[in-house]
Image (cartoon, helix red, strand yellow):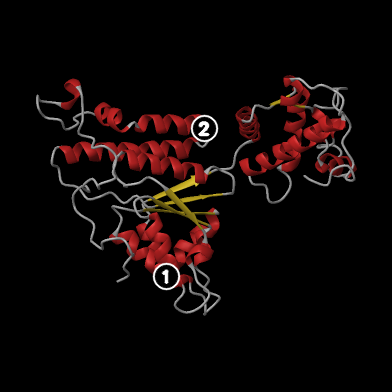
Amino acid sequence: MYAIPGTTRHAPSDTAPAAAPDAPPALAVVHGSASGAAGDSRPRTVEAVLADSQVEAVLDELDRDLVGLRPVKQRIRDIAALLVIDKLRAGMGLQSQVPSLHMCFSGNPGTGKTTVALRIAQILHRLGYIRKGHVVSVTRDDLVGQYIGHTAPKTKEVLKKAMGGVLFIDEAYYLYRPENERDYGQEAIEILLQVMENHRDDLVVILAGYKDRMDTFFQSNPGMSSRIAHHLDFPDYSAAELVHIAQSMLDRQRYRFAPEALRAFERYLQLRLQQPHFANARSVRNALDRARLRQASRLFADRQREWGEEELCTLEAADIMASRLFAQAASSPEAASSTHPASGPLASDPTIPAPATPAQDASA
């Protein structure tokens, strides 16, 4: 069997795990009548567990910080409910196995998978299911070596860092490359499988990646599939949700869209969604970064002017329309009727400038 340095190998217990030295405060401290009989400090109600763990605050943050994703948020609440009830059962001495909490997050890039993993770690830590609540995010390169004898030490070192928390493996399907007989990914998978089973009370593994590729990965690795208890599908964001995400990103940085800029950005998204390699919120963030660069260049050009807070915080339509996507749409016969600004909702607004040429801005 593979031994992870710094850990004690043991089989999962049939009862709830005992709190480790650095675990969060025990859930047994309950005030008022919620704790049951006098002198009995064990939580007897859902409200008592939530009050001690503050899990509700994490769920509220998830709702507030992430746009859309209703099925994902509901599944997270379901998992939290299971763990809370499990705590109540353990407090009454009802025997139960440690629940399997390994997960798979499938979806396109930029759909919030990493953010949800961080919130999951907080929930598990506050309920005492993991000791530290940290997230170690890795890819194949962090786990698989390039020569014989290199993979096991790399994988064990990553697992040692992740113990007591969550191990997030992005694009996990790259661990398995059957077309290469000399590939060492299978060795990393075997180590992961054993640790996921033997240390499931001290480590949660989350596999992430494109849905179709994750499905193929599980078909080729039934042992891994059988250890994943929760499969969460992350849908792409709608255009309206992407606009909401953009405004939230700007708010956090103390920027805002001018009214014309907001309409220009809505049209930008219509064009960008038709392009390949769109990465949802990640692409929105990149577009806003480029818009801020254009705004900075525009303000920098007028060196003698004294700028106020309004100008420093506002993105104008010109900062959005300078994207090459507008110039491409203007020159494309196929897009002339559906995506050219002159034929859309921006056409009647004389305050929105004409699209830039590719020479003005080579970025998307």
In the rendered structure, the answer to whether residue 232 lies left or right of residue 338 reads: left
Instruction: Please name whichever residue, 254 or 76, is drawn nearer the observer in this view of the structure.
Output: 254
- As drawn, the label of residue 102 is none
Instruction: Please name whichever residue, 122 or 91, is drawn nearer the observer in this view of the structure.
Output: 122
Residue at the spot 87% in from the left edge and 39% down from the top edge: 336
Residue 281 place in picture, x, y as percent: 62, 40
Query: Is residue 310 something one can see in this rendering?
Result: yes
Residue 77 place in picture, x, y as percent: 38, 36
Q: Is residue 34 above or below residue 166?
A: above
Count the marks: how many?
Answer: 2
Local secondary structure at mark 1:
helix
Residue 298 place in picture, x, y as percent: 83, 32
Local secondary structure at mark 2:
helix
Task: Give the amino acid at mark 1.
Answer: Pro
Badge 2 crowding class, 10 Å Cα cut-off, few under 14, some 14 to 19, many 20 or more, is: few
Image-quadrant location for residue 156: bottom left
Residue 22 place in picture, x, y as percent: 29, 45
Read off the residue under disc 1.
153
Give the quarter of the figure containing the C terminus: top right
Query: Is residue 221 something one can see in this rendering?
Result: no
Task: Give the amino acid at mark 2.
Answer: Asp
Read off the residue under disc 2.
65
Residue at the spot 13% in from the left edge and 41% down from the top edge: 93
Residue at the spot 39% in from the left edge and 69% down from the top edge: 190
- Outermost residue to the front: 304
Q: Is residue 107 above or below residue 340?
A: below
Residue at the spot 74% in from the left edge and 32% down from the top edge: 265
